[in-house]
Every structure is written in structure tokens, then in C-alpha cells.
Image (tube, grey):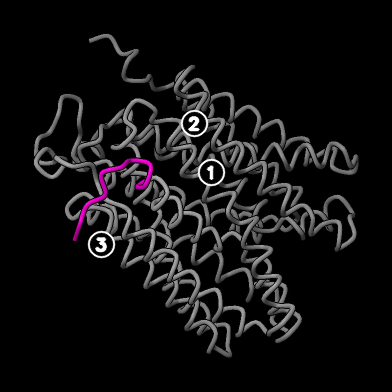
Amino acid sequence: MFNIKNKYLVLIGALLAQVTIAGLYAWSIFGTALQHERGWGGNEILFPYSLAQFIFAFSTIISGKLVDKKGPRIALFIGGLLYGGGLILSSFVTSPSLLYLTYGVITGAGVGFVYVCPLSTLIKWFPTHRGMITGLSVGVFGGGSIIFQKVISNFLLVTDVSGAFLKLGIISMTLILIGAIFTNNPEGLVKQKTEKGEGDFTTLEMIKTSKFRITWIMYWLAVIPGLLVLGAAKNIGIEVAGLDAATAAGIISILAISNAGSRLISGTLSDKFGTLNVLKLIFVITITSLLSLSFLAEIKAVFYLSVIGVAVGYGGFLALFPTFTNQEFGSFRYASNYGVVYQAYGLAALSGIFIKSMVGSYTSTFIFSAVAASIGLALSFKIKERDKITK
């Protein structure tokens, strides 16, 4: 198949695929509709989303290896078929258990196959702006949820949940496959990819380092709060701040904007001030916001600023950890390496629900999450960025 040589066409193609899988973050719209139409309970509608997040992270191990060996296009084709196909199959299910399979497993795997492609590909096309391009890529993923909240909501005005799943599946599959056509590695990279450069790590070499282990734990502890708040924003607004249902629903858009903006800004700042320095700042913002949610949430202004702070932190982490992985372990096996690092995200997706079920209230969950983030901040002082290491 032909190769695209214009980096801006590749940018458009990769981001088209990336924004399409952002429909994952609009799950709460489907969840609410399933509650109303079918009377499903809270856990029954939350689990497909959490499972999809876990499978999403797990599948990046496979997709990362595929991207490193075969390039991004074939991974995007597979991802488009899985993501769109999972949504289409979800339109036919009538029980929560089947939805766990179609949405949680198949759609979740599709997200994982698509997600790593823009990250690993665009860094190769824009090597001098790694932070900015990573922030743009994950920012599109986070911000795209705003678009799909509107799209899915409009579908539900004219059809039922099954019809909305079907329409979204067909549209998503088409857009991702179009994006795949325009996405490939730079010319000449095929000849260079077997040449391991100075400072590059294979995945096996990476996981043997203490820096990898510390980074992995930091990532896990960092994203637990954001996953929890973004996944249950409406319920948190009602239960913690006493908002009415309509007002609480509006939080979703506010958090999506904060999340997306933070991804782009954090990535750009990392190019100027160092990735680790910005990571430490994001940890501080997250911890402060969680403590404010725990003790001052009855003050509406504090509540809004705090949930925005958690979303800003979450978006920042999602931009900075991919950049840090590339920076510290090189581009030689970046897709595979980040696929392993990203498993921390998958564990975090399940950890937040576990903590919530264990402690009961959101307030107590915020305190536990603040402790986790504080440990992550402490660990950030245990490592140094590569360019600061004295050899």
C-alpha cells in the first residue's frame, strides 16, 4: 500500500482515528440510557466501562509489538474493526453479561489497538516536539469525548440504546479505517528500525531497570483519582456536592475540556521545563484537589475547582508518562515499551472501583486517592531525567 510522505496528512489521519475512540469516555451517556430503558443497576452499567478500560490497557501490549514490527496502519485497521465491530455487536445484546463481552472486551481491545498508533507514529514525524505532539495526541483523545457526548445524545433522541450503538459503531469503524489509510511511519524508518541507537532500550532491558519500576508505580497511583472522577462525575456531583441531576450532568463537559486542555498544555510545558518537573507539579495539583474534595466540597466553588483540578491532573499524567517513556527508554521499541508501562493505567481503572467499594463513600475514596498520589509524588524524587544523569 502507498505511503503518505506529508507529515501533516499523517497528523490528520492519526488524529482522526484517535478522536474517534474518544467515544469510550462518553460511556456515561449510554449508562444512563441503559438504566432508564432496561432498569439495569449501577454496577451493571459501570462494569462495561471499567472492563473496557482494563482491556484497552492490556491490549496495548499486543498492539505495541505489532506497531513496532509492522507499522501503525495494520494496527489501526484491526483497531477499527474491533472498536466499530464491538459497538455494532453491542446493539444486539439484551443482558449485561453479553455487553461485558461486546463492549468491555471487543470495543476495549479496539481502543488499545488504535491508541498506541498516533502516539508512536507522530513522535517519529515530529521528533523535536515530543512533548507537544504527545500532548496533542492524547488531548484529542480526551477532548473528543465532548463531541461524542453530543453525538450519542442526539442519536438517543431519535432511537433507543441499540440503535445508538449501531450508528456509532458504523460511523466509528468508517472513520478509523479512513484514518488508517493516511497513517504510516516516515520513509526510511523501515531500514532504520533494526538499528538500536544509543540510549535505546528493548522492552526486556527496560523492565529490568529500577527507573521503569518506579515509573510504573507512579503512573498507577497517579491516574486512579482521574479515572474515578471522570467515570462517575455525575454521581459525585449529586452525592458529594448536593447538585441536582441536570447540573451534575454538566460537570462531564467541564471535566472533558479540562482534561483535554491539560494534556496539550502539559506536553508543551514538558518540552520547556522538563517532564519530571511538570509531573511533580501535576501531582501537587491532584493531591490538593483531592483533599479539597474530601473536606470542603460543600462549598460549590471549591467543589468545581477541585474536580477540575483532578481532571487537569489526569490529563497531565496521560500526556507526560508517554513522553517520559520515550525520553528515558528511547524510540527503538517505544510502542512496545509504552504498552508495558500503560498496564499501570489498566490496574488503576480497576483500583478506583475497588477502593470505592471497600470504603463506601466518595469522600473516603478521595482521601485514599490523595494518599496514593502523595506516594507517587514521593517516588518522583527517586528518579532523574536522562539528560540530568551524570555519566
In this orientation, which residue lies closer to the viewer: 17 or 270?
Answer: 17
What element does badge 3 sit on?
helix
In this orientation, which residue lies closer to the viewer: 153 or 252?
Answer: 153
Q: Which mark is residue 252?
A: none
In this orientation, which residue lies closer to the viewer: 124 or 387?
Answer: 124
What element does badge 1 sit on?
helix
In this orientation, which residue lies closer to the viewer: 146 or 380?
Answer: 146
Q: Position of residue 70 (x, y in %)?
A: 18, 55
- Residue indicated by mark 1: 139
Residues at marks 2 and 1 touching, judged by CB atoms closer than 8 Å: yes
Q: Position of residue 47 (x, y in %)?
A: 57, 70
- Residue indicated by mark 3: 74
What residue type is disc 1 on?
A: Gly
Whichever of callouts 2 and 1 sits on the residue coming sooner in the sequence is 1
What element does badge 2 sit on?
helix
To which quarter of the image does residue 82 belong?
bottom left
What residue type is disc 3 on?
A: Ile
- Residue indicated by mark 2: 267
Q: Is residue 292 left or right of residue 322?
A: right
To which quarter of the image does residue 266 belong?
top right
Q: Position of residue 42 (x, y in %)?
A: 70, 72
User: Residue shown at 72%/82% (left/top)?
Assistant: 158
Count of all numbered marks drawn on residues in the image? 3
